Each structure stands twice: as C-alpha cells, then as structure tokens.
Amino acid sequence: MFMGEYQHTIDEKGRIIIPSKFRESLGATFIATRGLDNCLFVYPMSEWSVLEQKLKSLPLMKSDARAFTRFFFSGATECELDKQGRVNIPAHLREYAKLDKDCMVLGVSSRVEIWSKSTWEGYYEQSEQAFNEIAEKLVDFDFNF
C-alpha cells in the first residue's frame, strides 16, 4: 500500500525522484499515465493488470467508456527507475500534469500520484473545505471511520 506525501523537484531532463518507501512496491518496471484532476497515476504492474482487465470489460458501444479508455491508455507508458531512484517522465505526461519544477509525490493506496506542487495545493485547499461533507456521504456506503 502506498501512503504519504513527499515534495520533490523535476529536473530539466524530466526526471523526478520516487520516494524510497515506494520503490520496492512499484517494482523494476511500472506504468505512468494521465490521471484525474490533472495529476499522473503511477501503478505497479500487478495493479495495472487488474485495472486493464476492468477497463477492457467496459462496454465498447458506450462513447463515455471509449473516451475514458482512450484517454487512459493512450497516455500510458512503461517506466523504470534509474540507479538514483529517479523516473524519467515523458514530455506528454509532464505537459498534461503541468510538471515544471516543484512536484508532490503522493501515496494513494494502490497507486502513486505525481502532481505539480501548485496544482496539488489548490486541489488540497479546495478538498480540505469539503472533506467533512465527503466523509458524511461515505457513511451512506457503510464506510465508518
């Protein structure tokens, strides 16, 4: 399980350090793709396989399913860490997530998310205000804290 929040910088070559706590669970190769809310989702191969099967089961005749599947898979790329624990983020993913210097690397259960620091701060501030309301709605799904 991935958890925690880490601030790192992305260098001029598009490389960012993956926190040491995440490296073993990500494995030798892993998948990075466009995520929701203008961040990147990073999955270990085992989680990617599960997600791939779920997305394959979406109905091809529904335009929303086709659009989401295209968005998700077309941005995906196989990645690996270098000897310093860095991953090279492809240009199209850096552009999508607006990664330029200061970044946040988050552990979110089964995946890692990479955010531009400014995007994350705006999202966090907005979400923090709604956190109690969201928690109340989760109780409807038999989820108690």
Image (tube, grey):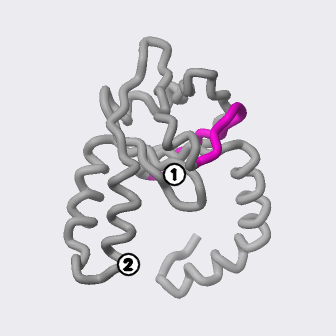
Three-letter amino acid code at the position of disc 2: Asp
Pick the residue in front: 61 or 125: 61
Report the span colored magenta.
97-109
Query: Which quarter of the figure is the C terminus placed in?
Result: bottom right
Front position among marks 1 and 2: 2
Disc 1 from disc 2: Cα separation: 25 Å
Q: Label 1: how many residues lie within 10 Å, few (<14), some (14-19) or many (20+)?
A: some
Magenta part, dominant SS: strand
Residue 107 forms part of the magenta stretch: yes
Q: Earlier in the sequence, mark 1 or mark 2?
A: 2
Drawn side of residue 84 relative to residue 104, left or right: left
Q: Circle 2 is placed at which residue position?
A: 64
Q: Circle 1 is placed at which residue position?
A: 108
Instruction: Residue lying at the far top in this picture: please name it.
Output: 83
Instruction: Residue lying at the far bottom in this picture: please name it.
Output: 140
**x%, y% of residue 109?**
46, 52
Three-letter amino acid code at the position of disc 1: Val
Drawn side of residue 58 relative to residue 32, left or right: left
Name the residue at 50% across, 76% down: 143
Q: Secondary structure at mark 2?
A: helix
Contact between labelled residues 2 and 1, with CB atoms less than 8 Å apart: no
Residue 121 forms part of the magenta stretch: no
Quarter holding residue 63: bottom left
- Please tell me the numbered disc located at residue 133: none
